[in-house]
Every structure is written in C-alpha cells, then in structure tokens.
Image (spheres, coloured by chain):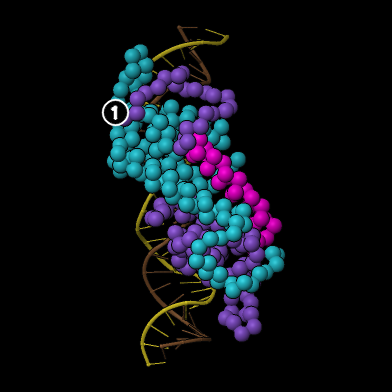
Chain colours: A purple, B cyan, C yellow, D brown
DNA sequence: TGTTATGCATAGCAGTGCTAGACATTGGAC
DNA sequence: GTCCAATGTCTAGCACTGCTATGCATAACA
C-alpha cells in the first residue's frame, strides 16, 4: 500500500511516542518495531526517523542517552519524558477525534448534537 | 482541542472526498458540514478549503459547475468523479491501516504475523 | 575480501499548505 | 436608510519543514 506523504507525516510522531511508551528503545529497533506493528505496510527509512527523534528530543518529549550494552554496538537509547507521555495522550485524543469524524461520514451514522442542518433538509442525487 | 498541522493536512482530503460522496455540494456548505461532523472540533477556514477544492479539481477527483439555484446566490457545486470515488476508497484503506497500526501499540494487543521480535525477548522497565 | 546487517547522523532544498487580503450579495436589525 | 452579520468565492506568495541523499563506522559471515 502506498501511503500519502501527509498521512505518513501525521502518524510518525504518535507512532514513535507510542513505541517508546512500551519502554526505552533505540533507533534501529524502532524501525524494526514500526515494520512489525504495521505488518510490513509502513516502510520507514532511518533517514526520516533520526531527524524525528532529534526533534522530539529538542521538544523535550524524549530523553536520549548513549549506551554500550555488554558486547554490543554503541546505541543511543530514547526514553519518554513526562511531557512525552502527555504529548502521546494528546495525540491519541486528536487521532480519536479525527477518526470518529471520518467514520461518521464513512458509515453514514445518524448525527447527534445541535444539528445545524445547513441544507434545510434538501437532498441532492449523487453525481 | 488544538490539532497538529500534520493531522489537519492529512485528514482534509479524505474528509472532503467523504462529504462529497454524500452528494454534490458547494464550498460554504462543506465548511458547515465539517463543523457539524466534528461537532465543532474542526474549525476550517474558507481560505484553506477552496484551494483544496481547486486541487482536487486539477487532479480530476471532482468536477465543478457554477449554478444559481432559483432565488439563491451563485454557487460552485462540486461532485465526485469516478477517480474521486476510487481515491476516497484508497484514502479510507490507508487510514484504516494506520489506525490499526496505532491501536496495536496503544492497546498492547498481542501481535499476529511473522513476529520479527528484534529484541529477542528482552524487556526494559519503562522510565 | 566483499557484502549484508547493524547503527547513527545531517545539510540543504523541494514542495506545498495556509494566511492574509480581496470582493460581492442578501437580509435583518435598528 | 444604514450597518452588520451571514453567505459565498477567490488567490498570491512565502514560511515552513520533512525528507532524500549521502556519509561514516563496526561486526559477522561467506
């Protein structure tokens, strides 16, 4: 499946935050995890992940630390900060809102709420 | 709720396409419909909708026609083309895919599939 | 010794979405 | 009569930023 740029951009941050909420992690493994979670549909490059990680760091949503596990390569581990957790919740709420909105049209649900009804009951035949 | 730019950008096209799939419509009414569907959470400006509509027109996803209903203002009505319907289906599939992916992390679902398990079973304590 | 997997980094520009500003008509309030 | 709000549409131009392309390094393995 070929995803639009917009969608990739919009989902990148919440996805990384969500993955880090599972526990600290490092770039290369995050890449693998994204692939796994999306069952191969999302194909992120490292070139797009690292800048994002740096951005999240600048924004204070994650903390980074170099570490060299026993007998392994040097890696930079990232961990969610409190602000990061809050940001994740916020993003999640936003996604839920948008998804709910889209579903309302897609599934033609009856609509609660004030009901502006801009069309005053008029209906047009499609196409 | 304050939405990120990315998310607004990513949802704009599918939302407009979805609204037009309900039947032909014109700019001002689409704005109202968006407000209604999102129950006031989405506050689009006309300045962002019209360029989008023009773009969709250029891409051949919608057709436009000036019309002046009996005793009403002149309006430009937009209608989905076949390509538009196809694009809507495509976008919908993409959203579903992403949403599914995000839910997997958010809800910590057990994961089906090949199971790359890049961490070889290791678990870290979260921050 | 060559290749693949692991692991990280960033300069710089292409691409584009929106803000700001403009214009016109209708109807109701005062 | 006048004014304001709602209705209705349009576009130039630039600010912003996300990614592509590229570079570097080590380990394992064939």
Q: Secondary structure at mark 1?
A: strand
Q: Position of residue A116 (x, y in %)?
A: 52, 23
Left or right for A113, reference B60: right
Viewport quadrant of the N terminus of chain A: bottom left
Q: Is residue B124 above or below residue B75?
A: below
In the image, residue B13 lies in the stretch drawn in magenta: no
Magenta residues, dominant SS class: helix
Instruction: Tell me what residue is drawn at x 62 percent, y 75 percent.
Output: A66
Q: Looking at the image, how many numbered discs can be counted on the residues? A: 1
Q: Position of residue B82 (x, y in %)?
A: 30, 39
The chain letter for the residue carrying disc 1 is B
Q: Position of residue B27 (x, y in %)?
A: 40, 30
Q: Which residue is mark 1?
A: B65
Can residue A31 be seen from the camera position used here?
A: no
Left or right for B44, reference C22: right
Left or right for A126, reference B36: left
Q: Is residue B71 above or below residue A37?
A: above
Instruction: Tell me what residue is drawn at x 60 percent, y 56 percent.
Output: B109
Viewport quadrant of the C terminus of chain A: top left
Segment tinted magenta in the rendering: A79-104
Instruction: Tell me what residue is drawn at x 50 percent, y 39 percent.
Output: A103
Give the quadrant of residue B80: top left
Q: How busy is the neighbourhood of tag 1: few (under 14 within 10 Å), some, or many (20 plus)?
A: few
Q: Position of residue D11 (x, y in %)?
A: 33, 37
Instruction: Tell me what residue is drawn at x 66 percent, y 52 percent.
Output: A86
Left or right for C24, reference B95: left
- In front: A2, or B11? A2
């Amino acid at each position: 499946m070929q995803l639009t740029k917009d969608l990739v951009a919009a989902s990148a941050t919440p996805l990384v935050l969500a993955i880090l909420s599972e526990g600290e992690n490092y770039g290369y493994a995050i890449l693998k995890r994204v692939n796994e979670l999306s069952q191969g549909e999302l194909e992120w490059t490292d070139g797009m992940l690292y800048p994002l990680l740096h951005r999240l760091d600048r924004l204070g949503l994650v903390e980074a630390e170099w570490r060299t596990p026993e007998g392994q390569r040097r890696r930079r581990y990232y961990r969610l900060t409190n602000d990061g957790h809050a940001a994740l919740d916020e993003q999640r709420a936003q996604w839920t809102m948008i998804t709910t909105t889209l579903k309302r049209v897609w599934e033609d649900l009856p609509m609660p709420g004030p009901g502006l009804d801009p069309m005053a009951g008029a209906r047009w035949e499609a196409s």
